[in-house]
Amino acid sequence: MFYGSQDDEAVLNNVNSSQGYFDVIVDDGGHSMKQQITSLVHLFPKVRPGGVYVIEDLQTSYFHGADSGYLVKTTTIEFIKQLIDDVQVDSPKKLTQIGPTMFSFEIGNKICFFNKK
Amino acid sequence: MNLLPIFLGISYLVMLVVGIYIGQNTPYTSPVKYYTKSVLQNTTVTVVDVNASFAFIGAKYKTDKVTFHHYDTMYEKYMRKYIGTNVSLLEIGLGCGMGYGPGASAYLWREYLGEKAHIYFLEFNKQCGEAWLATHGPKVKINTIHFVSFIFFLIFIVKYHNVLWQSG
């Protein structure tokens, strides 16, 4: 068990398995934009090659809020849209830190599976 | 005599009864079927036992991964290969604050993945997490913080105790 807030970098940096990596990480936490994106950016590097990172409950991106809503730039859904470019090796500009380490992702209703290179 | 309110009342009741009837007769078609009955002939694809499927075990522990959100088809696709392995899994959110109580997915992961799986949780509500761990931890065998990490954790508590306990 680890305790702390999932949008706190210091907490996330301390989350490590005794195996030295995680095969699977599932984000079913607070579901706010900041929580989902911060956790993804800081924990995706801890996923083992071939492993998967999952974000659940992406519908919160469409809720009306300070940093969420349809097509609002700061949402997790908009972040994932940037990854469409970033997983392409030939894309000239990388928009995210994690994009170049991502092999692929599969997105469905409210859920996304990110596959590590 | 104005019959309109009576008419509306009866209409409402008829719609309610029809709605309940339709609702009861259209159950959620579980994707378990896709994994237990292949349409392919002469395939060597291994077929999942219904009782060992993500959908079945998830429904058993009433996690919203299965009951409300129907994530089971995709979880089955990605997680099947880890069954019986020493997979290392971290989930953010133990489920403190959920209507059905914390720990539903902990039980799901343990039963679905098996005894060898290393299961970790990151939980914001320490009080709830500790209380759950005390009663359910031994049953589900959630990995506690290992030694090195524990030292970092102590350092972290000393440095960030005000952040950790007081804010989100």
Image (cartoon, coloured by chain):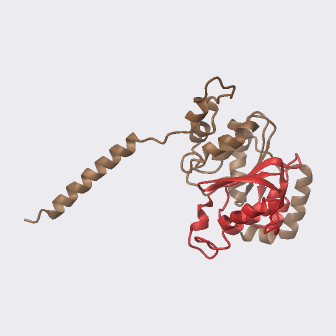
Q: Residue at x 68, y 37 (%)?
A: B112
The residue located at (59%, 39%) in the rendering is: B55
Q: Compared with residue B165, is residue B112 higher up or lower down, i.e. above or below?
A: above
Whether residue A6 is visible to the viewer of this picture, yes or no, is no
Q: Residue furthest bottom?
A: A66
Depth check, front residue: B93 or B86: B86
Residue B162, image x and y in percent? Answer: 79, 72
Q: In which quarter of the image is the C terminus of chain B?
A: bottom right
Chain assigned red: A
The percent coordinates of residue B107 (x first, y second) are 67, 41
Locate residue A115 relative to residue B41 in the image: left or right: right
Q: Hey, which quadrant is residue A35 in on the image?
A: bottom right
Q: Where is residue A11 in the image (x, y as percent from the top left)?
A: 81, 63
Name the colour assigned to chain B in the rendering: brown
Residue B49: x and y, percent? 63, 28
| Residue toward you, B28 or A98 | A98
The N terminus of chain B - image quarter: bottom left
- The residue shown at (88%, 45%) is A19
Does residue A86 appear left or right of residue B101 in this picture?
right
Q: In this view, does A25 lie above or below A74?
A: above
